[in-house]
Image: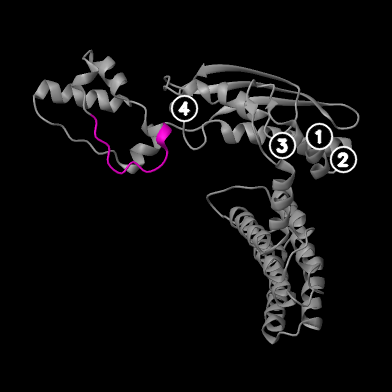
């Protein structure tokens, strides 16, 4: 930063003194010289006195460097047995309105270094065009292209597994770099010196199936329910909401996780939401919550789908063990008659 500031001010770097306090994280973004710095220094020099400026949070959001923005196509070539042959990435990387020091590296060098991940991939092509736009500048921030590179490959593997009818974990294991391959010379020209990726995968699966996995699944479900039940901030089509809930319910959920999903279903004003909630009425662990979700969704649909609503509410009235739920269902029926 000192050298860049000195260059902008046309002074010797030895005359520039920079003090940093509690920097915290996001070093890539904080290492660059922002336009405001140069304006402040010119003002100080013109006035002959110190100038203090503190950025506000709202200004920081729209002026600090952003971490990533790319439009890309990723391709993975495999043989008939599912062995990786080559990977290709073709992308446009947004640089923003002006070029930050680290701007070009995320979509170019760091994509190359991280695209292969932990897999034996003999050939690689990364073709990136860096383009200027009217957005905030892009710079190193939270991973600086590394998470994206890994994500591209993992997403490609999931897609390839689905298209070839191969279990996605089996496909990963089949192509992982093996302990006997080290030192491994990657197509990116990097040399891997060590690693036991098979053992790491096994350990990750054990965590996913244990208590840690249950906590992670609960957190993920809570996130989906929160996102899909927003009224104003996020507009998600009803069919997309129901598709998300349907997919989650296919998993091996515990009672708390089912309750989370039911709380989301209760916010969807769609006739299929009634059916989705009704499917859990026979589950003793969540029968009460399923009845409440049915009643809630029926209130949305009483006008356009009266027959379906009456059938669902009468089922709750006839089979519910909760007096409160029976009363609520009866009240909903009574309102339909008025």
Q: Residue at 24% of width from left, 18% of height from top? A: 13
305 relative position to 9: left or right: right
Disc 1 from disc 3: Cα separation: 9 Å
Element marked by disc 1: helix
Q: Which label's residue is closer to the chain start, 1 or 3?
A: 3
Q: Residue furthest top?
A: 10
Picture layout, residue 140 above or below residue 6: below
Q: Residue at 68% of width from left, 57% of height from top? A: 207
Residue for badge 4: 138
Residue for badge 2: 166
Residue for badge 1: 160
Q: Which label's residue is closer to the chain start, 3 or 4?
A: 4
Q: Which label's residue is closer to the chain start, 1 or 4?
A: 4
Residue 107 visible: no
Q: Which label's residue is closer to the chain start, 2 or 4?
A: 4
Label 4 environment density (alpha carbons within 10 Å; few <14, some 14–19, many ≥20): many
Q: Where is residue 310 in the image (x, y as percent from the top left)?
A: 79, 72
Disc 3 from disc 4: Cα separation: 24 Å
The answer to which image quadrant residue 113 occupies is top right
Residue for badge 3: 155
Disc 1 from disc 4: Cα separation: 31 Å
């Amino acid at each position: 930063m000192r050298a860049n500031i000195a260059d902008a001010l046309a002074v010797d770097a030895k005359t520039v003194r920079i003090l940093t306090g509690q920097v915290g994280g996001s070093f890539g973004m904080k290492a660059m010289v922002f336009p405001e710095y140069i304006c402040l220094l010119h003002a100080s020099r013109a006035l002959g006195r110190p100038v203090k400026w503190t950025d506000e949070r709202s200004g920081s959001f729209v002026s600090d460097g952003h971490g990533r923005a790319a439009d890309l196509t990723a391709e993975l070539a495999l043989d008939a047995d599912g062995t990786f042959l080559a990977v290709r990435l073709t992308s446009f990387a947004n640089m923003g309105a002006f070029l930050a020091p680290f701007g070009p590296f995320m979509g170019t060098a760091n994509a190359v270094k991280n695209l292969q991940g932990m897999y034996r991939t003999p050939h690689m092509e990364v073709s990136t065009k860096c383009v200027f736009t009217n957005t905030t500048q892009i710079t190193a921030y939270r991973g600086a292209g590394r998470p994206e590179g890994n994500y591209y490959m993992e997403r490609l593997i999931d897609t390839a597994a689905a298209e070839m009818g191969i279990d996605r974990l089996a496909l990963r294991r089949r192509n992982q770099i093996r302990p006997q391959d080290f030192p491994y010379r990657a197509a990116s020209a990097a040399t891997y010196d060590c690693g036991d990726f098979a053992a790491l995968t096994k350990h990750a699966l054990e965590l996913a199936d244990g208590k840690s996995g249950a906590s992670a699944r609960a957190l993920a479900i809570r996130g989906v329910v929160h996102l899909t039940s927003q009224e104003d901030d996020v507009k998600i089509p009803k069919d997309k909401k129901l598709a998300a809930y349907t997919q989650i319910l296919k998993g091996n959920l515990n009672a708390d996780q089912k309750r989370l999903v039911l709380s989301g279903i209760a916010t969807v004003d769609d006739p299929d939401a009634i059916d989705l909630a009704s499917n859990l009425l026979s589950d003793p662990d969540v029968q009460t919550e399923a009845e409440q979700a049915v009643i809630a969704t029926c209130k949305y649909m009483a006008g356009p789908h009266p027959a379906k609503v009456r059938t669902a509410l009468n089922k709750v009235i006839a089979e519910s063990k909760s007096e409160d739920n029976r009363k609520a269902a009866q009240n909903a029926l009574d309102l339909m008659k008025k």
